[in-house]
């Protein structure tokens, strides 16, 4: 089992930046691929970004590409999401996810996650 704890959410204005953190504990060898998802009120959970264990491969949703950056520090068992130029449509609960499966084209980095955090709220006011 892997336990994931997110932090760094908050209330910001449009154009501001935030950095989310996700600390993993437990069987961290099962967190080869890690990702961020988000869920806005009344909508389903959507993929935001993913990163391979080495950090050499990343993937982003089109809606955040160029504004968000995912990174990880394996020595600290932590993955980060740097969010710049935030907009009201970025509002939602942000979840960290991990899976033992590595970075492969099938099923791809946007699905197949086994472990989830409790989420951290990000609210962007206009």
Image (tube, helix red, strand yellow):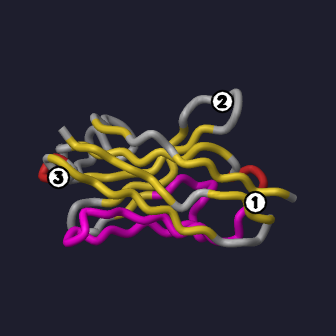
Residue 39: where, in percent of width, then height?
59, 38
For the residue carrying disc 2, how many other residues have a C-alpha within 10 Å: few (<14), some (14-19), or many (20+)?
few
For the residue carrying disc 3, how many other residues have a C-alpha within 10 Å: few (<14), some (14-19), or many (20+)?
some
Q: CA distance from mark 1 to mark 2?
A: 17 Å
Q: Closest to the observer: 15 or 49?
A: 15
Compared across the picture, whether 16 is left or right of 20 comes to: right
Q: Which residues are magenta?
A: 60-87
Please state which of the two labelled residues, at mark 3 or mark 1, is closer to the viewer. 3
Q: Earlier in the sequence, mark 3 or mark 1?
A: 3
Residue 75: where, in percent of width, then height?
20, 72
Looking at the rendered structure, the secondary structure element under dot 1 is loop
Residue hosting label 1: 87
> Which residue sits at x=22%, y=43%?
2
Residue hosting label 2: 43
Q: Is residue 62 magenta?
A: yes
> Which residue sits at x=70%, y=27%?
42
Residue hosting label 3: 28
Looking at the rendered structure, the secondary structure element under dot 3 is helix
Q: Is residue 118 magenta?
A: no
Q: Earlier in the sequence, mark 1 or mark 2?
A: 2
- Locate residue 44: give its quadrant: top right
- Above or below: residue 118 compared with residue 32: above
Q: Quadrant of the N terminus?
A: top left
Please state which of the two labelled residues, at mark 2 or mark 3, is closer to the viewer. 3
Q: CA distance from mark 2 to mark 3?
A: 30 Å
- Locate residue 56: give its quadrant: bottom left
Q: Earlier in the sequence, mark 2 or mark 3?
A: 3
> Which residue sits at x=58%, y=55%?
62
Q: Quadrant of the C terminus?
A: bottom right
């Amino acid at each position: 089992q892997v336990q994931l704890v997110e932090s760094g959410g908050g209330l910001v204005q449009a154009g501001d930046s935030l950095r989310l953190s996700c600390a993993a504990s437990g069987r961290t060898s099962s967190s080869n691929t890690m990702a961020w998802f988000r869920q806005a009120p009344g909508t389903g959970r959507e993929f935001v970004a993913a990163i391979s264990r080495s950090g050499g491969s990343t993937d982003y949703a089109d809606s955040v590409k160029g504004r968000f950056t995912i990174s990880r520090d394996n020595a600290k068992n932590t993955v980060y999401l740097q969010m710049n130029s935030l907009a009201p449509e970025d509002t939602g609960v942000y979840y960290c996810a991990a899976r033992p499966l590595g970075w492969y084209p099938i099923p791809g980095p946007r699905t197949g996650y086994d472990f989830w955090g409790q989420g951290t709220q990000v609210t962007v006011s206009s």
